[in-house]
Image: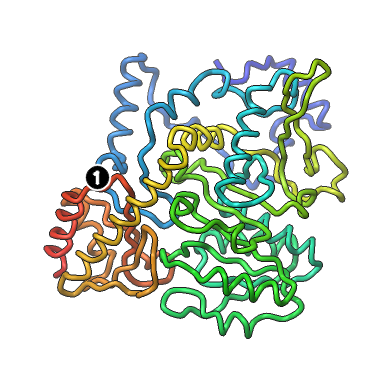
Amino acid sequence: MPFIANTDDDREAMLAQAGVSSFDELISDIPQQYRLREPLDLPGPASEMEVRRLLGELAAANRTAPDYVSFLGGGAYDHYIPAAVNTIVSRSEFYTAYTPYQAEVSQGTLQAIYEYQSMICRLYGMDVANASLYDGATAMAEAVSMAIAITGRSKVVTAGRLHPYTLDVLSTFIEAGDHARIVSSALSDGGCDTDDLEALMDDGVAAVIVQQPNFFGCLEDLERIGGIARSHGALFIVSADPVSLGVLRDPGSYGADIAVGEGQPLGNALNFGGPYLGIFAVSQKYVRKIPGRLVGMTRDRDGKDGFILTLQTREQHIRREKATSNICTNQALNALQAVVYLSLMGKQGLVDVASQSLRKAHYLAGKISGLPGYRLRYSRPFFREFVVDTPRPASEILPAMMEKGFFAGCDLAAFGENGLLVAVTEQRTREEMDRFTKALGSVSR
């Protein structure tokens, strides 16, 4: 039977309502060469047992992080996720909840979002955080659109190397919607050339944006960059890796006006690239310009604590011309995973994860730099990720390393660069890193 069980009479009624006499007339704007003229070439029916076997075979064709020793990074990181995270978020009251439109029956979901907002504010050192956005790239784009709306200016300056995908999303957002232009500072030793940044500044700059650590894993001078932004009346936007804040100063301490980030490292699996969540936080004076939704805590008439949607500056809820964004929802389940992860790790646990990642990354970097033909490209401080110049193109080294059981990193040629981007998390052991170094030496020629 068809997936949509409409009768012939149902279809006739719908076509009549649409003002056409046939389905072909309804889709007349679709060129003939793109229409399906014969049945799909699908296999016949199968039993449940046969389907499970087939799906298992298809899934086995994938090669995932647990199958290898992974040094992949570039925006998504192989941190350990405690078993309790998925157990808790898989409870039906969380897993099936879509969005908290009816506060009186959504108290659990609203409280989880409130806790998420509170944790992000503490982690990022900001006054207000929203209920999350889609991912780190769209969070950055929303931050820049917000800065343009606040300042009335139309120039955006990137300080240092942003993730190329973030820059692509940002360009799509502001060139199509805000009609602004993006200029990028020159690089110096893998980070922002602050003298060049200063030269790019003028009274038309709406925002200076920086990623910490940057795409190459290098740490930026946020004190200097923030000072340059403020001296020209531009908003200072920092995209910070949340795990790095276990050992690095938070964006709020540098005077960030808007702080964003990719929340994947907080208890969300790699998942072939998503879904993730976008972190978005601001200083108090910009609370009414924030996109998405905010959850607040109040008291009911009996004096009991309750949770409500306190602010929704979205076109679904207010006049479109007054909406700050057309962002339509938050990543509630992914944000809940971040809440559970942070709760389980606690303040010291996150410090331990960050410290181990930092120490292990520097241990591996030292080992690799001692190999003939390999060297670290930049001398700047880094957190858990670094760029390696290799004796052969990374595109040749990666498949050779896969044969030895390693995801060796990201080939920067995919982003218009050269070299290998290597990331190290707390999951990697000394024995794994020593084997990895030995394997790299064996594939150098």
State the quadrant of the C terminus: bottom left
* Residue 114 on image: x %, y %: 65, 34
Compare residues 253 and 192 and report the one nearer the observer: 253
Does 262 sit above or below residue 211? Answer: above
Residue under the image location 20 percent in, 56 percent down: 401
* Residue 339 on image: x %, y %: 53, 35
Q: Residues within 10 Å of mark 1 (few under 14, many from 20)?
A: some
Compare residues 226 and 7 and report the one nearer the observer: 226
Q: Is residue 73 left or right of residue 391?
A: right
Compare residues 414 and 183 and report the one nearer the observer: 183
Residue under the image location 61 percent in, 24 percent down: 97
Residue under the image location 36 percent in, 60 percent down: 385
* Residue 413 on image: x %, y %: 37, 68
Q: Is residue 104 left or right of residue 384?
A: right
The picture quadrant where one finds residue 434 is bottom left
In the structure shown, which secondary structural element does the residue marked by tag 1 occupy?
Answer: loop
State the quadrant of the N terminus: top right
Residue under the image location 22 percent in, 70 percent down: 369
Which amino acid, by three-letter code, is at mark 1? Answer: Tyr
Count of picture labels: 1
| Residue under numbered circle 1 | 68
* Residue 376 on image: x %, y %: 29, 72
Does 328 sit above or below residue 205? Answer: above
